[in-house]
Image (cartoon, grey):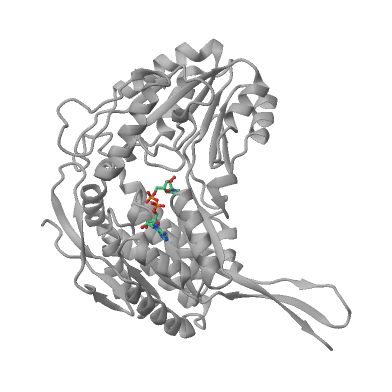
Amino acid sequence: MLYGDRPMLIGGQLTYGSGEWIDCTDPSTEALIGRVPAGTAQDVAAAVEAAREAQKSWGQTSIWERRDMLRALAAAVRARAEEVVAVEAADSGNTIGNLANDMFKSANQFEYFAGLISEIKGDTYAALSPNMHMTLRVPYGVVGRIVPFNHPFMFATASCAAPLASGNCVVLKTPETSPLSAAIFAEICAEVLPAGVVNIVSGYGLPVGDAIARHPEVRRIGFTGSVATGLAIQRAAAEATVKHVTLELGGKNPLVVFADADADKAADAAVAGMNFAWAGQSCGSTARVLVHDSLKDKVTRRLEERLAAIHVGDASDPASDMGPLNSGPHRNRVRNMIEAGKAEARVAFGGGVPAGLNKGWFVEPTLFADVPLGATIAREEVFGPVMTVQGWSDEAAMIEMANATPYGLTASVFTQDISAALRTARAIESGVTHINGSKMHYVGAPFGGVKNSGIGGEECLEELLSYTEVRSLHITI
Ligand code: NAD
């Protein structure tokens, strides 16, 4: 096994669990490359207890000490970035040539929240003079963070930054597929942080994620993953105690092209926004292209050309633009959705397995054209390299089409007409909307969904403050 057995981190100890293991398989080759412990509810209980104990002093450290620790984490991530990238490409199927950006985002998130740390503050109120009335912000204590497989290292690291900055200790659950890179983060935390400040438990949703969601000492949960799991976490959390739960969930994101748009730029943005380097496994993927009828054939042709130019291959090969899907079961799910889509719409490109790639969990970049209203392939999140094109002529009908999913994560609007752009941006139910752009995150501006895409903005001051509780203090003079 290339990467051997990798640890969890509980109470400052790198630990190998109770003897049950999860095998880690390279999605490009199907080779066994490592193992992580299959954590248990007992591991979660030990992790929460360690976090609770550690928080007594972590919550009392000066903001400057915490700032310096976050900066040390950023430096440690940078120092091991090359190693992480190699592990992650082999363990996740995300292409090695594009992973440097995830390392940047991991380190940057620690530095961003380190820089914001003095913004953790309350207000004063002009209430009953001469008395004084103010608010204080207090950490929750133990925060649970549960992350998905598509950016395993970036989510594992970045999800700890805001809770730590605001004085909490963290119990982090890594995804059951692609957990190896987050095990490197466990080693980093063991070196950089006091024992118990970050605890990392690998394992399955049940029992590990569920045990975190239910634990009465975990008062704040930040979850990134699917809608179904988000709902399960809300239910489990509500059964035990009252918790603050924020959710970053899926999307089926529209990219709207008006008749006056530049077809090439719109097609480029749609393909960039699909994140083919992640085989389309991105919550913000621009999976639904809604094009004005007058440009539909042109944009469809441009998309076909761009998809044909994508080189699909082993994710560890720097020449690959797109690797495999993350796991066998996920690949089967995506292929089933593509097959079902073929009964609903015309396949303009792809739809099968790339030639010569029968080993590994590959599918072709796939484009469905002339997709009718209401088609499942244009409504449900595939979480794979699948795009649909739908035509429109009436603006009101287009808005209805754009909003005809339970999701509301990202949207893009392409037009030269500023009024049409703003009108559309306001009408589309979406947490993040780009005008004449796609894909980018702008740290400092909230990233998060509406409707079933989630609750709460991240990568911004709101995220930092959301890991504190506001308490009012009234001083009688
Ligand atoms: P998932 O919901 O299957 O799993 C996410 C995490 O939840 C994993 O660690 C899993 O083990 C855990 N989990 C599963 N069942 C659980 C339970 N009952 N209780 C607690 N934890 C449980 O999602 P996934 O397949 O890993 O990721 C894909 C999904 O994540 C897509 O829907 C995608 O859009 C979404 N996502 C959203 C964002 C965002 O920022 N909005 C970012 C990335 C991914």
Residue lying at the far bottom of the rendered structure: 477
Q: Position of residue 267 (x, y in %)?
A: 44, 23
Q: Position of residue 448 (x, y in %)?
A: 54, 49
Q: Quadrant of the N terminus?
A: bottom left
Residue 381: quarter of image: top left
Q: Residue at x 32, y 37 (%)?
A: 279
Q: Position of residue 97 (x, y in %)?
A: 26, 41
Q: Residue at x 47, y 70 (%)?
A: 214
**Residue 448 in view (yes/no):** no
* Looking at the image, residue 52 lies above or below residue 198: below
* Looking at the image, residue 431 lies above or below residue 107: above
Using the image as rendered, state which of residue 271 and residue 53 is in the foreground.
53
Residue 419: quarter of image: top right
* Looking at the image, residue 393 lies above or below residue 163: above
Please state if 297 lies on the left or on the right of 177 as rendered.
right
Q: Quadrant of the C terminus?
A: bottom right
Please state if 319 lies on the left or on the right of 241 as rendered.
left
Residue 300: quarter of image: top left
Residue lying at the far right of the rendered structure: 129
Residue lying at the far left of the rendered structure: 1
Q: Residue at x 24, y 31 (%)?
A: 312
Please state if 22 lies on the left or on the right of 386 as rendered.
left
Q: How many marks?
A: 0
**Residue 50 in view (yes/no):** yes
Q: Residue at x 33, y 54 (%)?
A: 152
Q: Position of residue 283 (x, y in %)?
A: 44, 43
